[in-house]
Image (cartoon, rainbow, N blue to C red):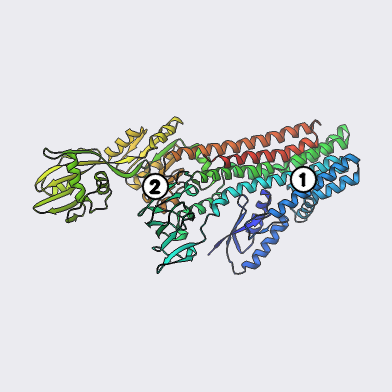
């Protein structure tokens, strides 16, 4: 049985190196699989046998150092500040020496500047060659710069190393900034809970607190576990979970989630879930796993990079030695070949493409849209049909009184008041809606429930019955119920007094969401288990393209299977009965971070706001991400191809080659990180 472990790492600054470490660690017998998440500085290991864990970790750390010097397991979660400062100071020192060498035209000065700027690159190249690791950026930089020294191009050789190191430094800063945007979420995990025990407040780890315990949450503190407010009232900052900037007001009886911040008063909260099962923990798990599911574009670039570099090296060899056989001037053609080597490193693509998807996932998490992987961001851009569940997805699941029909001798308000006095004894959603409509009432002293039918109250000589049309028929009355919504009938003694019509209310932003989707050319469908008349009326109100009602869960799945034959289908649902449909669609979106566990597990995207407009935002996020990724691909390949061509004809120098390598990488990374700043 495999055991899974996540370990923070530091010092891995190259995506190629991360891939090499993955391959070497996975080859070990004790390891089932290994993934180095470059974007969050973590190694995820699944052990086949962890009996020699400490010994294996030491061996794995040695492998990491061999592939990339300075790489290690980091208990401080990859701070890397010290190494970052050393790199910067070394670059500044080398730049100063280079300036002096240029001023004095000193070969020794160039050699010293070159050594200071590139000693680690040369060491890494030699070490990799010894271990038969060819065609990485260290090897390419070393061959190119030594070749430049060999043909007396001293300034350009040093400049290549200087700009390479500058690029590594700036690239590292960009990657760390991206990591922090996600790790701010991963580090939100509460570390303590103040528990009420025998009237005393005792601090415990959330993992030690059981369901049903009472927690004290003071002003300014993080809610450590999901629960229900027992006493107190306050405003909660929910931005960390949902991206919503407006504080949420809570009082006794309302739910609160781990990760929310108490802004005002003192709350007593009764826990309803274990710490490991909290909504915050689900979010953290989703974001941690997201980078393991790579998009097709990302996989394509990774495969291409393995072929691209060796091909360019072969071309460089041909350029260096074949043309001189016909036209002479070996030194000039070697110089042109060195230009090929400098720009052949695929760093701009290997780093910026995953960073683009990482940026999309990070930007989504800030908006309360949790995407489980880059592949789902891509799929969202291809969707042409969106299928919605009704209750809890397009509607609130809460009923409102829409109409009251009465007989002569009683007003609508009197009928509602009478029904509310009976319904006060029930927790049914219809009963709650009627009581909420009336306000404060006093319940009858004697109320009994007729399971499956309704309620019966006895008031002196009067008998009041409140329930469905079926209940009325059971009592001997023939009732024609032609209402579209759900009806609650009221009968006093032997007389029918009237009915109260209720409807599930449409979410406030549902119409806006449907209009936006249809404006984008996306077909909208609703599959509901509710009565056909109710589903049709909701569909007409929202302007949906197709509506089907009275469907069982398996019938929803069958309908989606038929659609996916010819269409790219997204399904949006919220409950346990939607889990199969969410899994069967091309991409599944689940409403609400506190929805059914099975639905959240089956879905590919979790919409924490519980808002239909977030479906539109998720699609827009996918399109933004894909646009930026392809901008990087075309820009990197286009620039490199142009400089390769110019270098072949002797127009481009090594300075342009440095820009085509380091400059393009930096610009592509900067473009990828734009997504992380798109938080509104």
For the point 69% across and 40% down, the residue is: 666
Q: Nearer the viewer, residue 613 or 133?
A: 613
In the shown orientation, is residue 427 left or right of residue 352? Answer: left
Per the image, label 1 sits on a secondary structure element best described as: helix
Per the image, label 2 sits on a secondary structure element best described as: loop
Quarter holding residue 22: bottom right
Residue at mark 1: 140
Provide residue 523's location: percent of width, then percent of height. Answer: 41, 33
In the shown orientation, is residue 376 left or right of residue 425? Answer: right
- Residue 612, relative to residue 422: is it above or below? above
Q: Which of 27 and 259 is in front in this view?
A: 259
Q: Do the residues labelled 1 and 2 touch (CB within 8 Å)?
A: no
What is the distance, in whole Å, between disc 1 and disc 2 at their CAs?
A: 52 Å
In the shown orientation, is residue 420 left or right of residue 52? Answer: left
Provide residue 667's location: percent of width, then percent of height. Answer: 67, 38
Residue at mark 2: 574
1 or 2: tag closer to the N-terminus: 1
Provide residue 423's location: percent of width, then percent of height. Answer: 22, 50
Q: Nearer the viewer, mark 1 or mark 2?
A: 2
Provide residue 653's location: percent of width, then percent of height. Answer: 80, 34
In the shown orientation, is residue 149 left or right of residue 447? Answer: right
């Amino acid at each position: 049985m495999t055991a899974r472990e996540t370990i923070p790492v530091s010092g891995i600054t190259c995506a190629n190196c991360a891939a090499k470490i993955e391959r070497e660690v996975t080859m070990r017998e004790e390891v089932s699989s290994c993934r180095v998440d470059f974007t969050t500085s973590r190694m995820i290991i699944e052990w086949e046998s962890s009996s020699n864990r400490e010994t294996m970790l030491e061996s794995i750390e040695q492998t990491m150092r061999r592939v990339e010097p300075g790489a290690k397991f980091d208990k401080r979660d990859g701070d890397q500040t010290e190494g970052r400062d050393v790199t910067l100071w070394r670059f500044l020192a080398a730049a100063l020496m280079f300036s002096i060498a240029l001023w004095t035209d000193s070969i020794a000065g160039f050699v010293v500047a070159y050594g200071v700027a590139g000693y680690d690159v040369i060491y890494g190249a030699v070490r990799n060659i010894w271990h038969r690791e060819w065609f990485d950026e260290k090897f390419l930089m070393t061959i190119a710069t030594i070749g430049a020294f060999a043909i007396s191009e001293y300034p350009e050789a040093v400049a290549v190393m200087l700009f390479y190191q500058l690029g590594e430094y700036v690239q590292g800063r960009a990657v760390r900034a991206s990591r922090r945007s996600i790790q701010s979420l991963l580090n939100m995990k509460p570390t303590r809970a103040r528990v009420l025990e025998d009237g005393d407040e005792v601090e415990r780890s959330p993992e030690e607190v059981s369901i049903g315990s009472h927690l004290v949450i003071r002003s300014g503190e993080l809610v450590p576990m999901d629960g229900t407010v027992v006493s107190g009232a306050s405003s909660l900052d929910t931005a960390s979970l949902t991206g919503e900037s407006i504080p949420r007001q809570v009082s006794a009886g309302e739910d609160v989630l781990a990760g929310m911040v108490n802004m005002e008063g003192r709350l007593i909260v009764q826990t309803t879930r274990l710490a490991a099962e909290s909504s915050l923990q689900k979010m953290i798990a989703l974001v941690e796993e997201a980078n393991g599911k790579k998009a097709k574009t990302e996989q394509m670039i990774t495969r291409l990079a393995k072929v691209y570099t060796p091909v360019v090296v072969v071309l460089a060899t041909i350029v260096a030695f074949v043309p001189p056989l016909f036209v002479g001037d070996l030194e000039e053609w070697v110089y042109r070949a060195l230009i090929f080597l400098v720009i052949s490193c695929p760093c701009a693509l290997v780093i910026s493409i995953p960073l683009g998807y990482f940026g999309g996932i990070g930007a989504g998490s800030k908006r309360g849209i949790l995407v489980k992987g880059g592949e789902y961001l891509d799929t969202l851009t291809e969707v042409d049909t969106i299928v919605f569940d009704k209750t809890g997805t397009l509607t609130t699941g809460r009923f409102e009184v829409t109409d009251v029909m009465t007989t002569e001798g009683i007003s609508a308000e009197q009928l509602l008041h009478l029904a509310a006095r009976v319904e006060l004894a029930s927790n049914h959603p219809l009963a709650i809606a009627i009581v909420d409509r009336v306000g404060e009432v006093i319940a009858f002293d004697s109320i009994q429930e007729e399971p499956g039918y309704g309620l019966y109250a006895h008031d002196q000589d009067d008998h009041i019955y409140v329930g469905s049309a079926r209940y009325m028929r059971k009592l001997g009355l023939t009732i024609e119920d032609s209402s579209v919504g759900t009806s609650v009938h009221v009968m006093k003694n032997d007389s029918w007094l009237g009915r109260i019509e209720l409807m599930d209310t449409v979410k406030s932003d549902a119409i806006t969401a449907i209009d936006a989707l249809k404006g984008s050319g996306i077909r909208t469908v609703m599959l509901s288990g509710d009565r056909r008349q109710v589903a049709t009326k909701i569909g007409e109100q929202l302007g949906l393209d197709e509506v089907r009602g009275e469907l069982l869960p398996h019938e929803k799945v069958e309908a989606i299977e038929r659609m996916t034959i010819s269409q790219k289908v997204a399904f949006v649902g919220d409950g346990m009965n939607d889990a199969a449909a969410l899994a069967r669609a091309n991409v599944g979106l689940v409403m609400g971070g506190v929805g059914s566990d099975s639905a959240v597990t089956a879905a590919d995207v979790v919409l924490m706001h519980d808002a239909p407009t977030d479906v539109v935002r998720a699609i827009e996020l996918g399109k933004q991400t894909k646009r930026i990724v392809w901008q990087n691909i075309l820009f990197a390949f286009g620039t490199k191809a142009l400089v390769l061509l110019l270098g072949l004809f002797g127009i481009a120098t090594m300075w342009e080659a440095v820009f085509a390598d380091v400059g393009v990488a930096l610009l592509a990374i900067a473009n990828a990180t734009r997504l992380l700043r798109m938080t509104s």
